[in-house]
Image (tube, grey):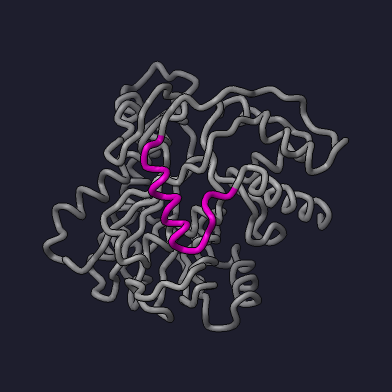
Amino acid sequence: MASISNPAVPKGSRVLVTGVNGFLGSHIADQFLRNGYKVRGTVRDPSKESWAIDTFTKLYGKDKFELVAVPEMELEGAYDEVVKGVDIFAHSAAFMAFVNEADKVIPITVAGAVNALKAAYAEPSVKRFVLTSSSAAAVGVLESGITVTEESFNTKAVERAWSGPPYEPARPLINYEASKTEAEQAVWKFHNENRSKRPDLVVNAVLPNLIFGRAIDPIGQGIRSSAGFVAALWNGNKTAIHDAIPSQYFVDVEDTALLHVAAGLLPSVKDQRIFAFADRFNWDAVLDVMRTLEPGRNLPDNFSGGRDPNEIEPRAKAENLLKVLGRPGWTSLRDSVAANVLNASTRTDKL
């Protein structure tokens, strides 16, 4: 990363990363650690995530990373203790439950995000709050012909999620989209209503589309979330999730994590929504990349082409932030898939 001459928060400061065991959360921690910051990571049960301590201690030495428990982010005051002494709060924890009933998903996601921001407001040391939102908060997976702007919110998903039965097959996905939409909207609402109390606190949100790339620790951590979709194809398995996700935009996990660093450290990035949409992809393009990486490998036949029909106006602005931080721009689909399948091969070899 290019050196920031005057970071909003000085090196050596402490960053709180919620959901640090996740695919993206672990990379957010890694990016801050490699750039001279300390990280306190939250998980539900630290005893089940000891790989994180082992991995980050090996990479960055002792006393740079600590793991703490937040069993239920939706409970009032969930982050009140772990936020003490923190300078940057990156809320990446997510509640993933794909069910038909909106009231089993949306309130938990919203409460987790608002609790995190309330904790940041209450702790004087916190100067930056970064929300991991989602592309789903701006545009739905099944939306077509949408031009996304910095003001776009996926209100259609919210309306459909709360419409009740009968439940269409896509309702669990719609509920997820609605949960991310309502959570981000709730964060901005709280911040706008309370910013006069903490004029020194900057809030930013990062909205990634489907995330590919390498896992921090493919053996201890596993290949989680959307990285697992690529790994499945590499191992010859086409699943229902591949059929459910049409052509989309993708983004590499390291690019996405670095955009969280930009949101936390760049003085010019204030109260912004950062749209992490690298480029369009489809599953056939992913398979084509795989065939160039290992000709003759037993892979599924092409099954899903097409081109995402939506235009994402703010994606160039996000790419420029990567360039400010020393990247040439978005990581290519080929490079991201290659890193992803190297993990998959490593894990297969070790099992």
Residue 327 placement, left or right of 109: right
Q: Position of residue 227 (x, y in %)?
A: 62, 46
Which residue shows up at 80% across the image and 33% down it? 299
Start-end of magenta stretch:
312-331
Depth check: give the residue in front, 112 or 311: 311
Relative to 182, say whether 126 is above or below: below
Q: Disc count in the image?
A: 0
- Residue 179 shown left or right of residue 245 in the figure: left
In this rendered view, identify the residue nearer to me: 45 or 197.
197
Image quadrant assignment for residue 176: top left
The picture places residue 56, in percent across and down from the top left corner, at 60, 72
Q: Residue furthest bottom?
A: 62
Quick check: is 323 in the magenta stretch?
yes
- In the image, is residue 2 above or below residue 303? below
Q: Position of residue 232 (x, y in %)?
A: 71, 39
In the picture, the quarter occupied by the C terminus is bottom right
- Picture coordinates of residue 159 (x, y %)? 30, 26
Residue, far right: 296
Which residue is at 77% across, 25% downward?
301
Q: Nearer the viewer, residue 192 or 76?
A: 192
Q: Residue furthest top?
A: 166
The answer to whether 214 is drawn above or below residue 225 in the figure is below
| Observer-nearest of 99 and 30 | 30
Check residue 104 for magenta coloring.
Answer: no
Q: At 38% from the left edge and 56% from the top edge, which residue is drawn?
A: 73
Please tell me whether residue 183 is drawn above or below residue 165 in the rendered image: below
Drawn side of residue 198 relative to residue 71, left or right: left
Residue at coordinates 35% horizontally, 52% vertically from top-left?
Answer: 205
